[in-house]
Image (spheres, rainbow, N blue to C red):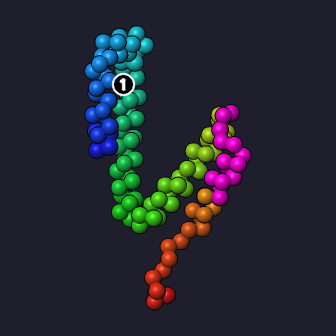
Amino acid sequence: LLHQLLAMGPLVIPWALSEKESMDHLNETGALAVPSLMAVFVSCLLGLCISVSAFHCRQMVSATSYSVIGNMNKVLTIIINCTIWSHHATAAGIFWLSCCLVAGYAYSQVKPKGMP
């Protein structure tokens, strides 16, 4: 939530400078209709839920494990990207990304000396 609030600050300036044109365009395109506003609200709510779940996840695991979890979550995005759109990563890009994912899968924390 804090990130979203901080990002809004710099965006106020261009919005204020083009307010009349922006509002006219939003009215003409129907972006201020109830379904559009509900989609924005649901998107914001999902973003908030993702942030809260990230905080809970971060409390349960180490920072390094959290980074690995974040990188491993890219698998679904990659699969969707390759199956739906025709403009996606090259074969070499997917190969190197697969190498990163395999390394993430093989990752384990180093045990301190003296621990079994």
| Horizontal arrangement in the rendering, residue 63 relative to residue 75 (left or right) | left
Along the line of sight, the residue nearer the viewer: 61 or 98: 98
Q: Which residue is mark 1?
A: 37
**Position of residue 34 measured from the top left corner of the image (x, y, whole percent):** 36, 20
Magenta-colored stretch includes residue 96: yes
Residue drawn at x 49%, y 87% as measured from the top left:
116
Residue drawn at x 29%, y 19% as measured from the top left:
17
Residue drawn at x 58%, y 47% as measured from the top left:
76
Magenta residues: mostly which secondary structure?
Answer: helix
Could you tell me if residue 53 is visible in this image? Answer: yes
Along the line of sight, the residue nearer the viewer: 63 or 80: 63
SS class, disc 1: helix
- Label 1 crowding class (10 Å Cα cut-off): few <14, some 14-19, many 20+? few
Q: Which quadrant of the view contains residue 112?
A: bottom left
Q: Which residues are magenta?
A: 86-99
Q: Which quadrant of the view contains residue 56?
A: bottom left
Residue drawn at x 38%, y 15% as measured from the top left:
26
**Position of residue 96 measured from the top left corner of the image (x, y, whole percent):** 66, 54
Q: Which quadrant of the view contains residue 29?
A: top left
Q: Amino acid under label 1?
A: Leu
Along the line of sight, the residue nearer the viewer: 94 or 18: 18
Vertical placement of 49 versus 22: above or below? below
